Image (cartoon, rainbow, N blue to C red):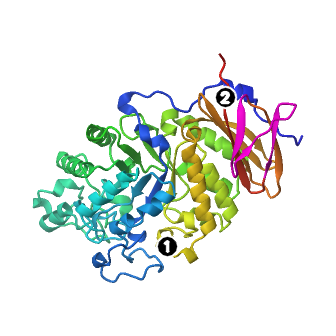
Amino acid sequence: MREILFVSLAFVMSIGASASTSAQNQGAAPAWIKDAVFYQIFPERFANGDVTNDPPGTKEWGGKPTPRNYFGGDLSGILQHLDYISSLGINALYLNPIFASNSNHKYQTTDYRIIDPHFGDEPTFRELVDSCHARGIRIILDGVFNHTGVDFFAFAAAKKNGAHSRYKDWYTFHGFPVGPVSAPNYECWWGHGSLPKLNTQNPEVREYLFDVTRQWMETGIDGWRLDVPNEIPHEFWKEWRALVKSINPEAYIVGEIWDEAGPWLQGDEFDGVMNYRYRMACVAFFADRSIDMMHFDSLLVQLRREYSDHVNASLLNLLDSHDTERFLTMCRGDVASWKLGLLFHMTYPGVPMLYYGDEVGMTGGKDPACRGTMVWDPSLQNRDMLEYTRRIVRLRRSLPVLRHGGFTTLLTDGDRSLYAYMRRTNSSSAIVVLNCGNVQQVVSIPAPPGEWRQVWPVEAKVEKSEHETISLPVPPRAGIVITGEEERTR
């Protein structure tokens, strides 16, 4: 049977209205997070705003990224492009590490107390925070507290003084003298000798990291993304969260955990995690096209069931990042697939994040290829993708139901490549229909109560038929969004 079989809209309207449930105050995510659209910036590759702080041997902007080369991106470059970021509709930034480090990615910290000199200094950073806040943009930093670089003062002292060093217990050494990075005799991240692992069970280490946290919280930042936090004991994060929330109760804490993260999301550690499993489902459906909509929907159902509604609403959803292939690359350059994925991304529960440059058509495989320099030359940008991004972000930010509403699947029609779902709050609803096929389809929807209008891709009045149904044409490889305010019973 090829006719469209929608879930009963009357039933959908009768079930719970919103994805959010009341959370214990001590475990609640910040109130602003549901309204956030994040933009991730890899500072070394975003913009070179101050050539006087360029590292020696800086390469020409636009060159091929390698694990060790530099292009001169810095904090001034971000400052100079805040108007551009605002024009995207972005209201939250996540910056990869900015503290002193002898690597281009800055995950090998040499000094947590200072901004990397090739990025600028603390006054420049404070100016960035203040300028972001003046534009209504939140800013969170990357906290790399699991490991340091080998030039970090405590590791350098232990290597120099061996068993007599007062810092020997800041790490876990298996003997002295300290071995070279090529043959480490100490605990390190995934066996990389250049990334010795801190002993966070040592009270001195904890207090040092807590002091660092206090220092940067006092600059006015709005939260932290935590690098490999699953490798640090839960007790550390419980104490650390209490500290962060005591300074700023509205700080957002999000962990980099690629798998199921329930133990960290009980309200006493993180507000959310980077939703990599969501990304994998989106890549399989929109990019690889290796699963159908029934399978895609079942994956999403499974993911939502693992967490409470208020946690699901606080997850940082991503289609790519500095650790993955870019989404357009995974789509094999097919912009239509990319657009479908972004439409879904901006209409799904959780906190959507864009990776810098995706909006202008940047491509790139696995690290380091995904860490190319931002394309600023308009003649090299995909301007259609840029405008599409601005419009779809604007749509999300203009409709509270897309940020606060519950999620109900309405249709998974494999024969016609149609996928539809509803977002709903107590007072309004939005229906999204995606046509993943190559021919136009007409979708008939049992008419929900109230007045409805189409808001994507164009504004249009929605007419009901004499049979109280709405029939809408859905273009191939595209989607539509209609919204309605419910009629209230008196």
Return the residue found at the far top: 490
Does residue 81 show up? yes
Question: In the image, is residue 203 above or below residue 125?
Answer: above
Residue 287 visible to the viewer: no
Q: Secondary structure at mark 2?
A: loop
Q: Which residues are magenta?
A: 449-474
Q: For the image shown, how many numbered marks are present on the structure?
A: 2
Of residues 119 and 220, the one nearer the viewer is: 220
Q: Residue 95: which numbered mark, if any?
A: none
Measured from the top left, where is residue 129 in percent x and y?
Answer: 32, 55
Q: Residue 72, relative to residue 465: is it above or below?
A: below
Q: Residue at x 61, y 26 (%)?
A: 16
Indicate the amino acid at tag 2.
Glu
For disc 2, the marked residue is 486
Q: In the image, residue 194 lies at what x, y percent?
A: 31, 67
Task: Name which residue type carries label 1.
Answer: Trp
Question: Quadrant of residue 56 in the image?
Answer: bottom left
Disc 2 crowd rating (10 Å Cα; few below 14, some 14-19, many 20+) is: some
Occupied quadrant, residue 151? bottom left
Q: Which residue is mark 1?
A: 376
Q: Quadrant of the N terminus?
A: top right
